[in-house]
Amino acid sequence: MNWEAFLLTLKLALIVAPLLLLIALPISYFIAYSSKSWKWLVEGMVSLPLVLPPTVLGFYLLIVMGSKSPTGRFYEQLTGNGLVFSFNGLLIGSLFYSLPFAVIPLSNAFGNIDRRFLYQSQILGKSSLETFFRVILPLSYRGMLTALILTVAHTIGEFGVVLMIGGNIPGETRTLSIDLFDQVQALNYNGASQTAAFLLCFSYLFLSLIYFINHKCKIGYETH
C-alpha cells in the first residue's frame, strides 16, 4: 500500500473533521431551533452534496478557486500559490463535500433535546450562549461523536471532488482513493486489492464504531 498517500489522506481527514465540527455547530443550531419559514433552503443547500455528483461540485469549486476567479486571484496574491492542485484546495473542497455528514447528525442531536431543559435554563437567567455551552452541547455529545467519525470516514473515501480539485500530485494531492484508481489503471491489481481492502475495513470499522457508541449511550440513558 502507498503509505505516503495514506498519511496524506489521514492528515486531510484529521484537519477536516474538527474544522467541520466548528462550522456545523451554528448551522445545526439554526436548523434545529430557528422558526424561520425559509430554513428549509438552508437544509437543502447543506444536503446538496449528498445527491449532487462529486464531479459537478468539484467543477464549480474548480471554477471558484481557479486563478481566473476573484477568490483564486486573491489567494494567489496573498500566499503566492494557487488553490487548485494544492493541499489547501483539497481541504476546502473536502469541507464543502463532507458538510452534510457533520450538520445532519448534529442538527438531529440538537432537535432531540428535551425543550424543558432549555426552558429551565432560561428561567434560571442563563443567556442563549450559556445555554448552548452548558446544556445543549453536553446533551449532544453522541451527535458530535457521530459527526466527527462520519466526516473522517467520508473524507478518507473521497474521490471525485479530490480528483477535480487536486489532480494527482504525489505527496501533495494524491490520496488513497486516487492511488487506488492509478493502480487499477496500471493493471496493478495486487496493490489495488490491498488498498481497496484497507479502505473497506476502515469504513466498516468506523461505521461499527458509530453504532457501538449509539448503542452504549442508549443503554446508559435507559439505565438512568
Image (spheres, rainbow, N blue to C red):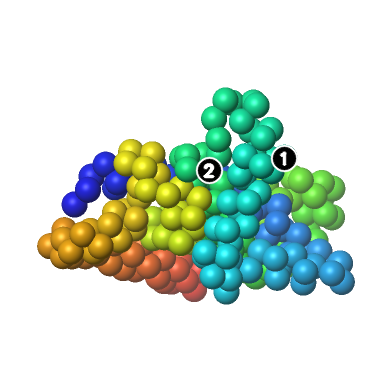
Check disc 1 and report the residue beneath it.
70
Q: How packed is label 2: few (under 14 Cα within 10 Å), some, or many (20 or more)?
A: many
Count of numbered circles on the image: 2
Residue at the image position 77 percent from the left and 54 percent from the top: 121
Asked if residue 139 can be seen in this view, the reply is no
Residue at the far left in the pictured view: 190
Q: How packed is label 1: few (under 14 Cα within 10 Å), some, or many (20 or more)?
A: few
* Disc number for residue 139: none
Residue type indicated by callout 1: Pro
Question: Residue 10: percent from the left, percent from the top?
Answer: 36, 46
Residue 204: quadrant of the picture: bottom left
Residue 212: quadrant of the picture: bottom left
Q: Is residue 85 found left or right of 31 in the rendered image?
A: left
Q: Tell me which label, 2 or 1, sits earlier in the chain.
A: 1
Question: Residue 27: percent from the left, percent from the top?
Answer: 70, 56
Check disc 2 and report the residue beneath it.
84
Residue at the image position 87 percent from the left and 71 percent from the top: 37
Residue type indicated by callout 2: Val
* Residue nearest the observer in this picture, 53 or 19: 53
* 3D distance between C-alphas at marks 2 and 1: 13 Å
Question: Residue 136: percent from the left, percent from the top?
Answer: 67, 56
Q: Is residue 25 found left or right of 42 in the rendered image?
A: left
Q: Is residue 9 found left or right of 81 in the rendered image?
A: left
User: Does dot 1 land on a helix, a strand or a loop?
Assistant: helix
Residue at the image position 37 percent from the left and 67 percent from the top: 207
Asked if residue 49 can be seen in this view, the reply is yes
User: Does dot 2 land on a helix, a strand or a loop?
Assistant: loop
Residue at the image position 63 percent from the left and 68 percent from the top: 48
* Residue nearest the observer in this picture, 39 or 212: 39
Question: Residue 126: percent from the left, percent from the top?
Answer: 80, 47
